[in-house]
């Protein structure tokens, strides 16, 4: 069985987004149970020179549905500064990304194979083909930001484990 571009991108993105969604919900419940304000976590940083929790969560969406949209357009750029939407807004960013990815068809995504896409940051441009961009750039970035968001929630005392991060596994039926 051949693995398709849809399988390595959209299916993987959805698995990670499901894990992020579940960890965000566990963190919300943790805050509710412990009389904490989740909105106070939105701007939290692991280190002074790192971007905040909100950026980590938004970047998960940007490197999933945003990556597919970038491939379709032939160009992908990093997301600019976003207003901090509050904790519920971050949950919505992930839910919206899941819905947009779920609306994509296998044929639609597989048709992107071989398409040129340029990563652009200021004057710097890096040329890719769709599958290399998605697998060597977006997927690692997605996991970096999902892991950083997970680590922030763990540091804040949310009881999370590896299974929470992994999301729903794609097991043999």
Image (cartoon, helix red, strand yellow):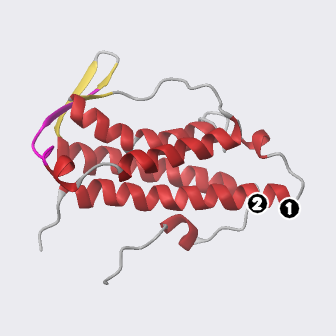
Crowdedness near tag 1: few (<14), some (14–19) or many (≥20) residues, C-alpha within 10 Å: few
The residue at the point 56 percent across, 50 percent down is 148
Please provide the residue range marked out in magenta: 111-119
- Pick the residue in front: 81 or 109: 109
Residue 71, by quadrant, is: top left
Please, is residue 96 above or below residue 160 in the view? above
Q: Marks 1 and 2, how far apart in space?
A: 6 Å
Quadrant (top left, top right, bottom left, bottom right) of the N terminus: bottom left
Viewed as shown, does residue 71 lie left or right of 148?
Answer: left
Viewed as shown, does residue 34 lie left or right of 116?
Answer: right
Residue 37, by quadrant, is: top right
Crowdedness near tag 2: few (<14), some (14–19) or many (≥20) residues, C-alpha within 10 Å: some
Q: Position of residue 126 (x, y in %)?
A: 22, 30
- Pick the residue in front: 45 or 62: 62
Taking the magenta stretch, the answer to whether it contains residue 148 is: no
The residue at the point 34 percent across, 45 percent down is 138
Q: Position of residue 39 (x, y in %)?
A: 76, 40
Viewed as shown, does residue 50 lie left or right of 153?
Answer: left
Name the outermost residue toward the right. 35
Residue 28 is at least partly visible in this image:
yes
Please, is residue 81 above or below residue 87 in the view? above
Quadrant (top left, top right, bottom left, bottom right) of the C terminus: bottom left
Q: Which mark is residue 22?
A: none
Residue corresponding to mark 2:
29
Residue corresponding to mark 1:
33
Q: Position of residue 76 (x, y in %)?
A: 30, 30
Name the outermost residue toward the top. 123
Verify CB contact (< 8 Å) between mark 1 and mark 2: yes
Residue 154 is at least partly visible in this image:
no
The residue at the point 72 percent across, 68 percent down is 159
The residue at the point 52 percent across, 62 percent down is 19
């Amino acid at each position: 069985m051949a693995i398709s571009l849809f399988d390595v991108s959209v299916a993987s993105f959805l698995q990670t987004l499901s894990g992020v969604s579940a960890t965000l919900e566990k963190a919300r419940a943790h805050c509710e149970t412990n009389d904490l304000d989740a909105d106070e976590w939105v701007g939290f940083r692991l280190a002074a020179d790192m971007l905040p929790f909100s950026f980590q969560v938004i970047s998960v969406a940007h490197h999933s549905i945003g990556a597919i949209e970038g491939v379709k357009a032939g160009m992908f750029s990093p997301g600019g500064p976003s207003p901090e939407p509050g904790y519920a807004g971050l949950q919505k960013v992930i839910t919206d990304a899941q819905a947009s990815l779920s609306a994509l068809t296998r044929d639609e995504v597989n048709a992107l194979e071989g398409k040129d896409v340029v990563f652009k940051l200021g004057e710097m441009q890096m040329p890719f083909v769709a599958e290399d961009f998605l697998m060597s750039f977006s997927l690692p970035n997605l996991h970096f930001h999902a892991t950083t968001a997970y680590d922030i929630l763990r540091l804040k005392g949310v009881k999370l484990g590896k299974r929470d991060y992994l999301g729903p596994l794609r097991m043999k039926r």
